[in-house]
Image (cartoon, helix red, strand yellow):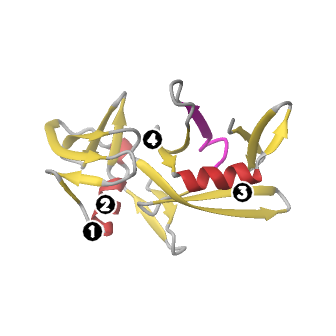
Amino acid sequence: MQQQLTGAQGGKRAIPPVHLWQPEFCGDMDMQITRDGRWIHEGGEIKRPAMVTLFSTILWREEDNYYLVTPVEKVGIQVEDVPFYFTGLEIETDENGQKLIFTSSTDDVVVASAECPLRVVTDPESGEPSPYLMVRYGMEGRLNRNLFYQLADIAEERDGVFGVQSCGEFFPIS
């Protein structure tokens, strides 16, 4: 069964069933995903968004290691922080409450929910918050600073904790 993601243009795109593939490890490749979501191959940034989006659909995580996988091979890549980077936010409200819908730089659309929780980690030295959202297969995406400010604007206080609500869940942001 293929996972379906809603693209930024509203169309559906299939995510290959990488969770079913068990290929042999073929070694590491010179590829890195930076903290701000840029994909670097052999020292140069991959500039074709369609290529980056394609690679993002075959990402796999095992413990703290990341791989690009196909049915026949698995190659290791480096990830500075997390592999996804969120740059867009839509807020929808209906009879069931508020939904926070995030869009990544790789065209993944994820709704903050119990299945895809939002969490904020504060750097102990700088005090700077880093918000993360679960995407799939144990992999997260980081929200850019602008999105964090948007969340702060809509935050509400519950029992002394500031947070946001989405799909009936409350996510602390401070």
Tag 2: amino acid: Val
Q: Mark 1 — residue? A: 48
Task: Depth check: give the residue in front, 35 or 107.
Answer: 35
Q: Mark 4 — residue? A: 137
Assess disc 1: are there few (<14), some (14-19) or many (≥20) residues with their C-alpha within 10 Å of its C-alpha: few
Q: Which mark is residue 52?
A: 2
| Residues at circles 2 and 1 in contact by the CB criterion of under 8 Å | yes
* Residue numbers of the magenta segment: 111-122
Which residue is at a point 44% across and 53% down the rendered structure image? 1
Q: Where is residue 50 shown, x and y percent of the image?
A: 31, 68
**Picture quadrant of residue 27:** top left
Residue 75 position (above or below residue 41): above
| Residues at circles 3 and 2 in contact by the CB criterion of under 8 Å | no
Tell me the SS state at disc 1: loop
Tell me the SS state at disc 2: helix
Q: Mark 3 — residue? A: 99
Of the image marks 1 and 4, the number of the one nearer the N terminus: 1
Tag 4: amino acid: Tyr
Assess disc 3: are there few (<14), some (14-19) or many (≥20) residues with their C-alpha within 10 Å of its C-alpha: many
| Residues at circles 3 and 4 in contact by the CB criterion of under 8 Å | no
Tag 3: amino acid: Lys
Task: Depth check: give the residue in front, 158 or 69.
Answer: 158
Q: What's the distance in space between the residues labelled 3 and 4, CA to CA?
A: 22 Å
